[in-house]
Amino acid sequence: MRIGVLTGGGDAPGLNAAIRAITRKALEEKDEVLGIKNGWLGLLEGDTMNLNLETIRGILPRGGTILGTSRTNPFKREKGPQKIQENLKRLKIEALIPIGGEDTLGVALKLSQMGVPVVGIPKTIDNDIPGTTYSLGFDTAVNEVMEALDKLHPTAESHHRVMVVEVMGRNAGWVAAYGGLAGGADVILLPEAPFTLGDVCEQLRNRHQQGKDFSIVVIAEGAKPKDLKSAVVQGTKVDEFGHPRPGGIGHVLAQEVEARTGYETRVTILGHLQRGGSPLAVDRISATRMGVKAVELVRQGKFGTMVALQGDRLVEIPLEEGLAGTRPVDKEIYRLAQIFT
Ligand code: F6P
């Protein structure tokens, strides 16, 4: 069989490990693998690269994706789905393995309903794909936040400051909750747990009254204080999936904290440092397991599915089930966050 592989949406540590696993498993089964460049754009344009033992050599520890990625939505392009079906035929691709988050896999689901044979792999540092307890990139991103907080503690303590750290996650708080817990944050603010600017200032004042004159505050970029008129995003542009560009709440929070409490406050926005690193072991192993499983599902003809981790069990579920609803941070996790902050 000739299997097409693409990586769509935000890049994440572990993508190359998944590409490597798919290629190795397929070649072992005497199948062929064709890399599709830049997410769904590559299928619209017929832009591909060979995936073989030579082209995947040494990619396991590399961040990013050797295929490139994009946030292209073929359903927003002139005759997009039709072009994809024509290119799949012309390229003689018999099955497709898209690796991506809800946007990329949402396109895969629609194409699957049009008869395109797909098996998806869940990837996003946000870890918010409903049908899987783990999405590629999450653990490495959490470690990036933890290490940043370890570095920020000494300087916050030395200057007796409030350090506001804004982390990624789009509308989910997984990166903030896990990164904050692992890094010992004093306050963790999530989209899933309502709070007001007044609550945060009161929590900081209480800390000062207990003699703790510095604080690390982690806030998810999608968190919105109840007493703030609207969510904070960058500019008015939206991408082809309708997403505004997240970010900026950290500065708003810091200004409010300093104005209301008088405590000197600084802001660190971790941004794409959470996306770019070399995958840690969890992401390398999860990617390897998921890549091999996806090829097995293709060979079994189990299309319209996605690979999923449920706890540590590797399963396959129908794409429409895997993408249904949302995946907010577990209540147990943010109760933990409240205990340790
Ligand atoms: O969805 C993954 C993610 O990293 C979000 O956490 C973040 O808000 C977004 O992508 C940033 O997108 P871009 O890299 O296109 O700016």
Image (spheres, rainbow, N blue to C red):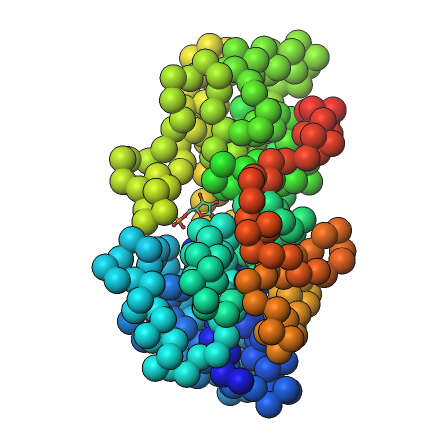
Q: In the image, is residue 176 above or below residue 114? A: above
User: In the orientation shown, which residue stands out farthest toward the bottom?
Assistant: 30
Q: Is residue 335 left or right of residue 305?
A: right
The reply, left or right, for residue 201 in relation to residue 36 is right
Measured along the vertical axis of the image, is residue 322 above or below residue 51? above
Residue 246 in the image: above or below residue 296: above
Residue extending furthest toward the left: 78
Residue furthest to the right: 312
**Residue 85 appears anywhere in the view:** yes
The percent position of residue 245, horizontal first and vertical second, equals: 36, 40
Closest to the observer: 73 or 284? Answer: 73
**Residue ID at (33%, 59%):** 74
Q: Count how many numbered circles sit on residues in the image.
A: 0
Question: Image height check: is 225 above or below 67?
Answer: above
Q: Nearer the viewer, residue 293 or 184?
A: 293
Name which quarter of the figure residue 232 lies in: top left
* Residue at 42%, 17% in the rendered image: 228
**Residue 283: where, in percent of width, then height?**
64, 60
Answer yes or no: is residue 201 visible: no
Q: Which quarter of the rendered picture does the C terminus lie within?
A: top right
* Image position, residue 37 (x, y; %): 38, 71
Residue 237 rendering spot, x and y as whole percentages: 27, 40
Residue in the foreground of this view, choosing between 299 and 187 = 299
Residue shown at the point (64%, 31%) measured from the top left: 185
- Residue at image point 67% right, 49% down: 133
